[in-house]
Amino acid sequence: MQERLLVGIDVGCRQHRVAIARSNGEIVKEFSVPHNASGFGTLFSELERSESTFKLPIVIGMDGFNGYARPLDQLIGQKGYPLLNINNLKLARFKELFSGPAKTDAIDARKIVELMRWAPHLQEQRRVVTEVKMGNSVNQTLKRLSRRRRQLVLEKVRIQTRMQADLQSVAPGLVDLEGSVDNLWYLHFLTARPSLRQLAAMRPESLLKIKGVGKKYAAVISSWQKSAHFAADVDLTSAMIIEDAKRILDLMTSIAALAKELASLCEASDLARMIGSIPGFGIISSAEVAGEIGEMSRFPSEKSLALYLGMAPLDHSSGEKTRSRTAWQVNTRTKAAMMVAVAHHAWRVAESRRYYDKKRAEGKKDNQAIRSLGRHLVRVIWSMARDNRRYQMRNEKEEVILKMT
């Protein structure tokens, strides 16, 4: 094996512990750096000094790629050092097998170095130590923005659930005016007055001035006003409900702005445009999948890609019970995006729908049938990326992949 300097970094919230060792395991330097510009400068100065002293190439292992490691992981890539992502679960098992007398950040950094030494000799080493390959700038931006959008959507759903429960408890008739509490006209109506009681006294001409409320919804509101009923604590809860409604409106504006930005970025990303050519894969799904994948070169085979996308569950059977489980390596964001996109794909492509129905007839549940179809689509995505082609249907019964333009 080529002689190298192994650098193990135990990532922390405010401080990182670093251990530098030769390939034989001899520790040559240990130190801590704060998570700031000064600390990063100290780290790279020490790396350059060690590289110059020992005349050996450096490879860095880190147990916290992304998360608290940002932006250190990006800086390491910019400096040109190979960066290995240490599988946290495998590192924990390694420390159990080769346990030490205590646990400290310094010991953990040494254990990372030790695992880097042993990785070439361990079974399925790719899952223990994998090289980090940064995606292009467009896909990295897609990743950050699509993650932000998903966070805002989850926040919106959480607030909607809370607001709907509050409305049900203090104004049961009001919550039934519209099937969904995130309808724009409904939210504008809730925020039109500082109290829910005042909504019941609004005149028809005032209702028509509310954004989105036309004659149809004004009539619906007038019908509710005739039998409006409020709980005793409505005045206390009104302010909370109106505040939540305003927050939902703000979130909807932010989510729409992010969706527009993602659509523009998808046009600039070859991978996103390729995935978006598959029927059922809209802007949001394409952005999430392309952003999380980053670069197809990260994956040695389409099987590893399927595992990462959550479309290849593992067998977890015992005796007469046949089950499956999700692998630890699954990216839960891409799995969620794939499940939605594949379900839409099944409705838009007749052959895919027949395959889905076949799996359902075999006794598979809805999600299992969707994952089975998703597994086939991963093969399609892999082939499209390999051959620089995109998906296009010729007719209902025949699907072809044409060369990208």
Image (cartoon, grey):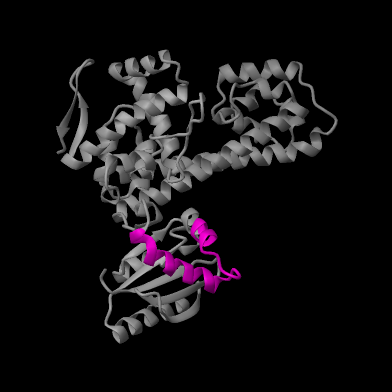
Above or below, 87 against 26 in this view is above
What secondary structure is the stretch in magenta mostly built from? helix
Most distant residue in the front direction: 319
Observer able to see residue 36: no
Q: Which residue is drawn at 40% across and 55% down?
A: 128
Q: Which residue is drawn at 50% across and 41% down?
A: 253
Q: Which of 231 and 2 is in front in this view?
A: 2
Most distant residue in the bottom direction: 53
Q: In this view, does 232 lie to the left or right of 195?
A: right
Q: In this view, does 98 lie to the left or right of 158?
A: left
In percent of width and height, residue 274 lies at 25, 38
Number of numbered discs overlaid on the protein picture = 0
Residue 100 highlighted magenta (yes or no): yes
In percent of width and height, residue 378 lies at 30, 34
In percent of width and height, residue 153 lies at 52, 40
Figure quadrant of the C terminus: top left
Q: Nearer the viewer, residue 50 or 204?
A: 50
Residue 172 position by quadrant: top right
Observer able to see residue 345: yes
Q: Nearer the viewer, residue 178 or 43?
A: 43
Residue 181 position by quadrant: top right
Above or below, 381 against 201 in this view is below
Q: Point out the stretch of residues depicted in magenta.
A: 92-121
Q: Nearer the viewer, residue 262 or 231?
A: 262
Above or below, 231 against 216 in this view is below
Q: Is residue 258 left or right of residue 233?
A: left
Q: Which residue is drawn at 31% across and 39% down?
A: 303
